[in-house]
Image (spheres, rainbow, N blue to C red):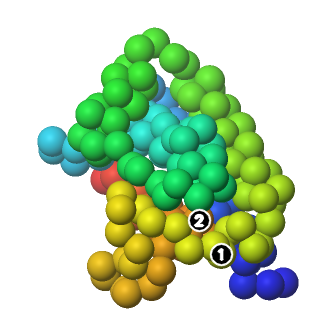
Amino acid sequence: MSDTQRILEDFKAIIPWVNQLVELDDAAWFKPIAEGKASIAEIISHLENWDRYLITKAIPSAQKGEGIVFPDFDPFNTAAYEYARSGISKSQLVGKFCATRMELYDLLLEIGEEALRKHVAANGVALCPHTGTPYSVLYIIQEFIEHDLHHKKQIDHALLR
């Protein structure tokens, strides 16, 4: 398996874990993971919203050679949190996340390794300020994997309390 294939498989690997969250009772689903933090429902909505953004805005922009522009995080995330509280059922939201992640995974496979590795600016910046690595769609997917794992760890910890 190539490095790119492994990264894409890692990106898809969260689906079974999210899928099992449908078994949570509503109290756990809507309870903040810590004081002043989002609920599990809000976090899953947040993850789905970012995947949808990659599909509809970021990747098409990168493919056109225009670079990627990420929205202001706070309002973007707030909209996802509000959606989680809008009345959508747990099974609908979990299903929506899983379907969107698979749609994104399939898109990443479709565009191919060359396009995934092509250098692209992110918010006008060519290199990651933390690592000095040139941005590419594949590099951003690796950052999203770290983002997924951060939230998975938060949720797992909250469910142990």
Identify the residue at horizontal 59%, vertical 58% (top origin). 65
Q: Nearer the viewer, residue 159 or 57?
A: 57
Query: Label 1 sits on what residue type?
Result: Arg
Q: Which residue is mark 2?
A: 137
Q: CA distance from mark 1 to mark 2?
A: 6 Å
Q: Quadrant of residue 80?
A: top left
Q: Nearer the viewer, residue 87 or 7?
A: 7
Identify the residue at horizontal 30%, vertical 79% (top origin). 129
Residue 89: x percent and y percent? 54, 19
Identify the residue at horizontal 49%, vertical 37% (top origin). 49
Q: Secondary structure at mark 1?
A: helix
Residue 76: x percent and y percent? 34, 36
Identify the residue at horizontal 46%, vertical 12% (top origin). 87
Q: Quadrant of residue 83?
A: top left
Left or right relative to 91: residue 112: right
Q: Which residue is mark 1?
A: 117
Q: Nearer the viewer, residue 85 or 68?
A: 68
Query: From what the image shows, is residue 55 above or below residue 63?
Result: above
- Answer few, some or many: residues within 10 Å of disc 2's Cα (few below 14, many 20 plus, some between 14 and 19): many
Query: Label 2 sits on what residue type?
Result: Val
Does the image show residue 127?
Answer: yes
Q: Secondary structure at mark 2?
A: helix
Residue 141: x percent and y percent? 56, 65
Q: Are marks 1 and 2 in contact (CB under 8 Å)?
A: yes
Query: From what the image shows, is residue 134 above or below residue 90?
Result: below
**Which mark is first along the chain, 2 or 1?**
1
